[in-house]
Image (cartoon, rainbow, N blue to C red):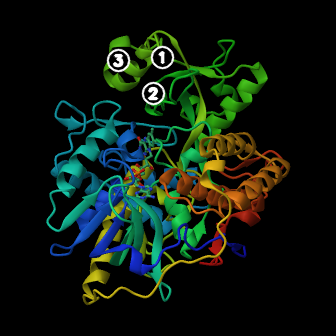
Amino acid sequence: MTPLEFTPRHRHLVRFSPKRVAHVFTDVLIIGGGIAGLRAVLALEPGLSAVVVTKDLLKVSNSAQAQGGIAGVLDPLDDFSHHTADTIAAGKGLCDPAVVEMVVKEAPQRIRELIEIGTRFDETDGQIDLTREGGHSHRRIVHAHGDATGREVMRALQETAVERDGVQVWQNTFTIDLLTVGGNCRGAIVHDPERPTTCVWAKQTILATGGAGRLFRETTNPEIATADGHAIAFRAGAELRDMEFMQFHPTVLYIAGSSRHLITEAVRGEGAWLRDGNGHRFMPDYDQAAELAPRDVVSKAITEQMSRTNHPCVYLDLSHLDPDFVRRRFPHIAKVCADFGLDIASDQVPVRPGAHYMIGGVTTDEQGRTSLPGLWAAGEVTSTGLHGANRLASNSLIEGLVFGARAGEAASRAAREIPNDFAVPAIGSDWESVEGDDEELNITDLRNALSSLMWRQVGIERTEETMRDAAEQVEFWDRFVSNREFADVSGWELQNLLLVAQLMIAAARSRTESRGVHFRKDFPETDSEQAIPIEIASILGPG
Ligand SMILES: Cc1cc2nc3c(=O)[nH]c(=O)nc-3n(C[C@H](O)[C@H](O)[C@H](O)COP(=O)(O)OP(=O)(O)OC[C@H]3O[C@@H](n4cnc5c(N)ncnc54)[C@H](O)[C@@H]3O)c2cc1C
């Protein structure tokens, strides 16, 4: 397929002159302090300096929210070939088999390293407890504190990474754009409300900014997941791939007024059933694997069943399982449900799907190298070829670990070869017209309108008609939003979301088939001719 092309309205979101900003020099800049960014920190060669920037506090990330666990072959009865086959089966013809094999083989070692730095995974009789999730043929998911795996892993990673010599962590620091000189990435321009706007000049930059769930009204992602990394890489000229593939998690707690808590797949792995509004257990009607079918199958079945029964949600039923086991195994979810007066072990728990994991992203090779020299990427912001058209549960934390380590090592090696140079290149950004006044714009209203539009028209089910309308609407908003210069994070996030929405819609319209998490009602079949990724090239904009 010929790559799609798209021109961002501006190369940079803000106008700047090197004479009027602060400058900092470092060997490696790491944008993002989730699992991928912090694993990259641990892989840096001793002696190198590094700056890690996070837009919120370090403890706020998709990684910290992860519940189910991390996939890896640790059971002697399991085998690399099984994990590889399960991943490729879920990816529906779009996985890169070499990348899958590489990640699967490195996974056990990356998990053991987490234990070495102090992560305490759950154990039974002194052995790591392995659970099973949808799409996995064996028990191979390590977990911690029952269903709070991310919190425990991030605790250990944070404690270790911030102690590293030469590493500075700048929290509440928003990366506005990458800096490029002569076609090479040379760092980023960042904003901390407490400091002057700063150019961080780096010999090598690693992008690890996570996901894009906030593009959709219903999502499991925290507020930071606004697709910034996808947008800033694209504006700098890096290629993106597979942008049509957003994975919707089938079971997100649905109680009006509550935040959208994810109910981990492991609940179904341990035997929970899904019932519709009439009490009917419907998954066996849709798939042989019933509740253990892959996520896209379960999400689609739930959407279909909600429409058939004209009911706003379906229900998870754990009442046939041992109540003590349920409360012990899922203490976090039990507590969240209890806060809303529900007993997870006996009540029917209302759920429906929500945007969960951004499969598409910045194209990388096996080292995490992007198409923009000097820029490496790892974690959810990437498209590495591991997930194909659908991510297998618990394969993303392991992807962040494997590619974080690889990008950290490769960026270190590349940084070592570049001599120190503390001169500031003569670049800046100075586009012409700045339209309108920030105060005329209700950014929250526009964000809500965008995420509702994406949910309704580019969500679990898509058609050319719904997406064409969405494209026109987003383009209209983008026309007046992106010609303004904002001075704070909410405006920049909106601009990033609008850009990435356009890229997602363009990719989804051009894939005229259904595959994995991309379901087109007007093209319900998979077309073997389209078993190739869709790449999007950035035609660099002005300024
Ligand atoms: C509720 C939930 C449960 C999940 N459960 C699992 C699971 O059990 N197993 C599994 O494998 N996966 C799970 N996932 C997916 C997994 O957590 C993520 O894919 C993974 O953690 C992404 O890691 P990351 O390092 O790429 O990004 P994140 O952990 O999201 O970190 C992103 C970092 O980038 C920073 N950042 C973003 N934009 C900017 C910017 N403009 N400037 C500066 N910094 C920026 C953020 O501040 C943050 O530090 C879950 C996801 C969610 C939301």
- Asked whether, in this view, residue 494 is left or right of residue 468, the answer is left
The image quadrant where one finds the N terminus is bottom right
Nearer to us in this view, 280 or 464: 464
> How far apart, in angstroms, are the residues tagged by discs 2 and 3?
11 Å
- At 63% from the left and 78% from the top, the residue drawn is 542
Q: Using the numbered discs, state the Cα–Cα distance from disc 1 to disc 2 in whole angstroms.
A: 8 Å
Q: Is mark 1 within 8 Å of ligand 1?
A: no
Disc nearer the start of the sequence (1/3) = 1
> What amino acid is at disc 3?
Arg
Q: Amino acid at mark 2?
A: Val
Image label count: 3
Viewer-nearest of discs 1 and 3? 3
Instruction: Inspect the image, locate mark 1, and give the three-letter code of the amino acid beneath it.
Output: Leu
Judged from the image, the secondary structure of the residue bearing numbered disc 1 is: loop
**Mark sitting on residue 327:** 3
Q: Which residue is mark 2?
A: 267
Q: Residues within 10 Å of mark 3 (few under 14, many from 20)?
A: some
Q: Secondary structure at mark 2?
A: helix
Of residues 523 and 72, the one drawn nearer to the viewer in this rendering: 523
